[in-house]
C-alpha cells in the first residue's frame, strides 16, 4: 500500500493545518514520506499563495521539521508552482506544475474559485462557450512543464472541478477531447508523472480524481506514469481514498511512482 503523499498545503498558504500538525498526523498514520507543496507566489493574485517572506519562513520551518522528525518520517520540501508563479526556488527539492488560471488579453482569472465565478468567466470571456475556455486552458497545461520545469504534473483537468455529471459542459465533446489530448501529448514525452489527485473528492466537488478515467487511460496507453496525491489542505485528508485508487491504477496496469528514497522512484 502506498503511504506517501507529496501534495499538501499548510497555513503558510491556503491550508488549514500547520506544517507540524501535518507531520504529526503523517507519523500517526504510519506514513513513510510526506511532502510539502505550498502555493508559490503569483504576484497578481496573492489570496491563496505564499508571499516571498512567507516562502522564506516556510522553507525554514520545513527544514526544521526535517531535522526534528528525521528518525520518524522522511520529509520533502517542495512547492506547487503555477504556470504564472514567480520567485526563488533554489531551496526546493521538487515542484508540482499546475495551471489554476486562464489568461485573456493580459488578464488572468482562476478556473477553480467557485462554480459561479467559473461560469461567469466563461460567459464574460467566451460568450458561454466552455470549449473555447477549455482550449485556452489546455494550451497552458500543455506548456506547463516547459514553462516551470516541474517534477510532477498537477491536477491535469482542474477545469472540470465543478463539472460533476457534465453539469456545465460535455467532456466527450470532440473539441474538449482534442484540447486535452493535445496537452497530454505535449507532456507525456517529458517522463514526469501525472497526479491521480483526490483533492476535489475530499472537498465534495467530484466523485472521482483528477484526471478523468478517460484521460488516465489515454496517458497510460502512451507510456505516461502517475503519482497518487491528496492535494490535502488539512490533516484529515492526507492519503484521501488512496487504497481505492491505488487498486484501480494497478488493476488497469498504470505505472505508479513516488519520490526518490520512498517506495519506488520518479
Image (cartoon, helix red, strand yellow):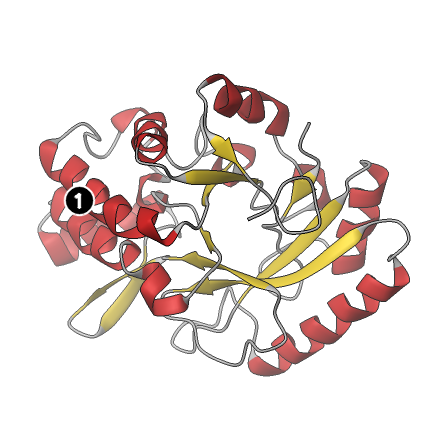
Q: Nearer the viewer, residue 153 or 118?
A: 153
Residue 182 point in image, percent of width and height = 19, 46
Instruction: Tell me: 113 left or right of 109.
Output: right
- The residue at 58%/59% (across/down) is 14
Choose top left, top right, bottom left or bottom right for residue 42. bottom left
Whether residue 104 is situated above or below residue 123 in the rendered picture: below
Residue 44 point in image, percent of width and height = 38, 76
- Binning the other alpha carbons within 10 Å of mark 1 as few (below 14), some (14 to 19) or many (20 upward) gives many
Instruction: Tell me: 167 left or right of 249.
Output: left
Residue 53 point in image, percent of width and height = 63, 82
| Residue farthest to the top, as pictured | 251
- The residue at 56%/77% (across/down) is 51
- Is residue 117 in view from this perspective? no
Instruction: Tell me: 123 left or right of 86.
Output: left
Residue 92 point in image, percent of width and height = 61, 70
- Residue at the disc numbered 1: 179
Image quadrant holding the N terminus, namely top right
- Is residue 221 in view from this perspective? yes
Whether residue 188 is situated above or below residue 240 in the rendered picture: below
Choose top left, top right, bottom left or bottom right for residue 125. bottom left
Instruction: Tell me: 66 left or right of 169.
Output: right
Could you tell me how many numbered marks the image carries? 1
- The residue at 24%/51% (across/down) is 138
Q: Nearer the viewer, residue 45 or 214?
A: 214
Whether residue 147 is situated above or below residue 192 in the rendered picture: below
- The residue at 58%/50% (across/down) is 7
Identify the secondary structure beneath mark 1: helix
Amino acid at each position: 500500500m502506498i503511504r506517501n503523499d507529496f501534495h499538501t498545503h499548510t497555513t503558510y498558504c491556503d491550508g488549514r493545518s500547520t506544517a507540524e500538525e501535518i507531520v504529526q498526523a503523517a507519523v500517526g498514520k504510519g506514513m513513510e514520506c510526506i511532502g510539502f507543496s505550498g502555493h508559490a507566489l503569483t504576484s497578481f493574485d496573492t489570496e491563496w499563495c505564499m508571499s516571498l517572506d512567507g516562502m522564506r519562513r516556510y522553507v525554514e520551518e520545513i527544514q526544521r521539521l526535517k531535522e526534528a522528525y528525521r528518525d520518524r518520517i522522511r520529509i520533502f520540501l517542495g512547492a506547487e508552482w503555477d504556470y504564472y508563479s514567480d520567485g526563488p526556488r533554489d531551496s526546493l527539492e521538487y515542484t508540482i506544475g499546475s495551471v489554476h488560471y486562464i489568461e485573456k488579453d493580459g488578464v488572468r482569472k482562476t478556473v477553480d474559485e467557485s462554480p459561479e465565478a467559473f461560469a461567469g468567466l466563461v460567459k464574460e470571456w467566451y460568450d458561454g462557450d466552455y470549449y473555447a475556455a477549455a482550449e485556452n486552458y489546455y494550451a497552458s497545461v500543455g506548456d506547463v512543464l516547459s514553462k516551470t520545469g516541474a517534477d510532477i504534473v498537477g491536477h491535469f483537468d482542474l477545469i472540470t472541478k465543478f463539472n460533476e455529471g457534465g453539469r456545465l459542459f460535455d467532456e466527450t465533446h470532440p473539441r474538449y477531447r482534442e484540447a486535452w489530448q493535445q496537452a497530454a501529448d505535449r507532456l507525456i514525452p517529458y517522463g514526469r508523472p501525472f497526479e491521480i489527485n483526490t483533492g476535489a473528492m475530499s472537498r465534495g466537488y467530484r466523485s472521482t480524481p483528477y484526471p478523468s478515467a478517460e484521460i488516465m487511460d489515454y496517458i497510460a496507453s502512451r507510456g505516461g506514469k502517475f503519482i497518487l496525491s491528496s492535494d490535502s489542505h488539512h490533516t484529515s485528508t492526507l492519503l484521501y481514498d488512496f487504497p481505492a485508487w491505488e487498486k484501480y491504477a494497478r488493476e488497469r496496469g498504470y505505472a505508479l511512482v513516488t519520490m526518490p528514497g520512498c517506495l519506488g522512484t520518479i
